[in-house]
Amino acid sequence: MSEPRKNHLSINGGQDNEDENVSSYKPIPETDTAEQVEYPETEEVYMQLNQSEIMETDQGEEVEDHWEHNSIKTLLSLYLQNVDKFRSPKVKKKNVWIDIANAVGKGPDCCDKKFRNLKQTYVRLLKKKNRNELVVVKWPYYDIFEQIYNENGEYQPEIQQRIQDGATENVTKALLSIVEPSNYESALPENVEASNSQSEESKRKFTRRRYTDFRKITLEMRNRQRTVEEKLDRFVITAIRSIYASRAGSLVLYGGQFHREQFRTSKNNLAKSKEKISPDGAEEKLLPKEEEAKIVTRVDMADAKYVVEDHRNGDAKIELDANKRQFSGLSKEELMKYADDPFWVNLRWFMFILFWAMWLCMLAGAITIIIKAPKCPLQPPRTWFEAGPLLEMGDATYDDIEVELPKMQSFLVQGIFVDVPTYEYEKPTVMESFKKFAAKAKEYGIKVIADLIPNYVGIDHVWFRRSVQKDSNYTDYFVWHAGKADFDENQTQPKLPTDTWKSTLHDHPWTFNTERNAYYLHQYGVNQPDLNFTNERVVQEFDKVIRSWMKAGAAGVRLNKARLLLVNSTLPEEHIATGKGMTPGLIHYNYNFWQHKHTMDLPLLDVLLTRWAGVVDSVTETPGEAVFTLAEEGEQKELFMIRNLSSLRPPMTAPLSVAGDLTKLAADMNLRLRKWPALQLNSSFDGDEELAVFSILLPASPVLEPHQLRADNDTAITESLSHLIPLRADAALQHGHAELRAVPERDSSAAALLACARWKAGKSGYVAVYNPSDESRRANLTDVTSLPATLTVHHMSHAARLLANQTNTSESVDDVFVPPRSTVILSYVPKIEVEQ
């Protein structure tokens, strides 16, 4: 037998509580007492349980609950078969007892009670056998209980606990009997002097009995010592939990010097050990109660090193890494104890329902947020007239235009501007011809925009004749004035109503009609009298004009000369143009010499334009899809640049010339391009097809001319324009960013070329560079913010390639070759910082 630790328990009577780890050791010196003890013969002792002991457990049974031997064996056999159900926390034991009771022929409670009594008998036998290992049990049901509670040589925790409690009680009783020898002395004869031989015999029996009991106690003490050592180890771990977690090092335990109250695990007595001083001089202190709850409740013993220095004195040293801590919850067995508890069952159901309720609420909330949240505005697709290009047909006849329709279709022309006789809408032949032409153009996917001139009618028009005759319905259809009171030099007619009003032909805008004896206004030609649009009847007449042409097949209308549609009826004199509006070198006969504040862009014009835009929408299936705009002549700034006119779609610019100062041109174009206008570029020479190529990339509706769509294979437009126009459908050109600027040549600062860059995040970018000069140039595009260091050539006309002998597919951003009067289009990946 291995030598145990020399720290032995000193129990001061009573049953030791398992929750209180008794740690007051009293070293028992190892003497030769064992050699002086005369041990009794260790014969095999057979323990036969007498009838009274067996029946002791049955005293509480009723007479009618008498059990036969076969019934008991059947009861135990059925219990053994269902032992897994009794141990399972998910099965109700009462239901199992009902099944067993039906098989035995007894009541469930009677079976349960009988089994408990037999179990008590089994435990008492185990306690006796534990006290003496040589005992042989012959109880008939012992083997069955062993099968129930003994698995692989180990008893169930419940049985082990009851055996241990019995051993503790027996040791305590035995120690008390040794401590109080009166229990033995009472067995001596009262008259010792009566017989010396008898006295000596009694003493020997007494001594033998005492040493026999002492040997039993020694065995019990050794077993108990091992139990206490295990409890002591558990207590050490518990004590370590209370030490500062940040204090790494070693903890030395001296078993021989600990006292009972220093090793209590209850929180009430744990505070008494806070000021313990270890032998190495380090002061050990426990945390305050408010900090104690924050300490990790478990130390991973895999990180602890157990060192035994002097086991004979019970000293043990535990080295651990205080920085490694973890939390451990309840084990599976501990959790299963509460599986069927009503409180926890209800709590689980409550949490289950709460979880799904919250989940459904979150799902509903997410759906609500998705539905109710403001959507990112979708960028609507460009209308057909914004997508372009549009074609300016001028005064071409219907027959001439029909011949060009297939070519227009190949160039993806969206619409064409066609001159129509404005006020001949009541002539059937005129309207029938237009209907056929519009239908023919529609077959090629091309829409017709009617060019109308609302300002005047011919001098032979029925309206004017009736107005001259002072017909009551037409008297004020035109602008009439009697003239000044005094007569002219010839004394034949009154003087002119105004002296400073001029027609666009640089002449007086008044002509005297002798039949009516009054002057009529004509700002264009003598045979083109101006209608009076301050008269509501005249406005209504033009409403009919718009409806008639739209119903005949027009996809929109463009009003020419409409800025001179109204005049000030009080006829005040004009003032000389000064400042930016003045044109040098003009005399008073010139139209631009005067300001024209009373004959141009009067405030009522906005009202008329809004009204007529509504008339166009009224005869269109989809409002906003028809064109309503003004033709600009270029001598004055466009009306949409002066006023915020939402009725114009699209707003239209005057033809812009690329000759002259390119920096000023780029600035003027940027102001106009903000509203995506219909824009037309021209140069100082005819047939500039490359300028049309440049306009394809502009953020506007390009307006081209028929000669720019020539079928000559030597032209760049035939080679490339038909392939470039579909590029306008790219997202970078539809809704991307734009930057137009005049750029210099390489190694120069003077603006010499035009560059327009288009890009959108996540899309390829494009830049068009136009050279208006007669010489080749190398453009420096570093000032264009979105461009990277290297660009890829996307388009260069065949003629330009031959001229430049260009074979490279990429260009440096500061050295882009552009042939004379040519456009080069390059693609690139926009810079990340510009995309954002």
Image (cartoon, rainbow, N blue to C red):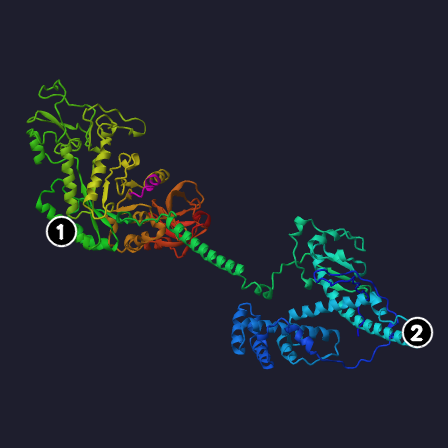
Horizontally, residue 550 falls left or right of residue 778, namely: left
Question: Which numbered disc covers residue 750?
Answer: none
Tell me if I can see residue 823 in this picture: no
Identify the residue shown where x is 16% and y is 48%: 553
Q: Which class describes the residues within 10 Å of circle 2: few (<14), some (14-19), or many (20+)?
A: few
Horizontally, residue 49 falls left or right of residue 654, namely: right
Examine the structure image and report whether residue 110 is included in the region drawn in magenta.
Answer: no
Horizontally, residue 324 falls left or right of residue 523, namely: right
Q: Which residue is mark 2?
A: 194
- Picture quadrant of residue 88: bottom right
Residue 170 is situated, as x and y percent measured from the top left of the image, at 75, 69
Identify the residue shown where x is 40% and y is 56%: 809
Look at the numbered disc 2 and give the secondary structure of its residue: helix
* Above or below: residue 535 compared with residue 197: above
Q: Nearer the viewer, residue 151 or 364?
A: 151
Which is nearer the N-term, disc 1 or disc 2?
2
Identify the residue shown where x is 68% and y is 64%: 302
Residue 83 is situated, as x and y percent measured from the top left of the image, at 57, 74
Which three-letter amino acid code belongs to the residue tagged 1? Lys
Tell me if I can see residue 721 in this picture: yes
Q: Which residue is mark 1?
A: 436
Count the marks: 2
Residue 719 is situated, as x and y percent measured from the top left of the image, at 29, 55
Image quadrant in which the N terminus is located: bottom right
Which three-letter amino acid code belongs to the residue tagged 2? Ala
| CA distance separating discs 1 and 2 | 161 Å
Q: Nearer the viewer, residue 543 or 834?
A: 543
Q: Nearer the viewer, residue 377 or 660?
A: 377
> Bounds of the magenta span?
669-677
* Above or below: residue 568 compared with residue 771: above
* Above or below: residue 452 compared with residue 39: above
Which residue is most to the top? 486
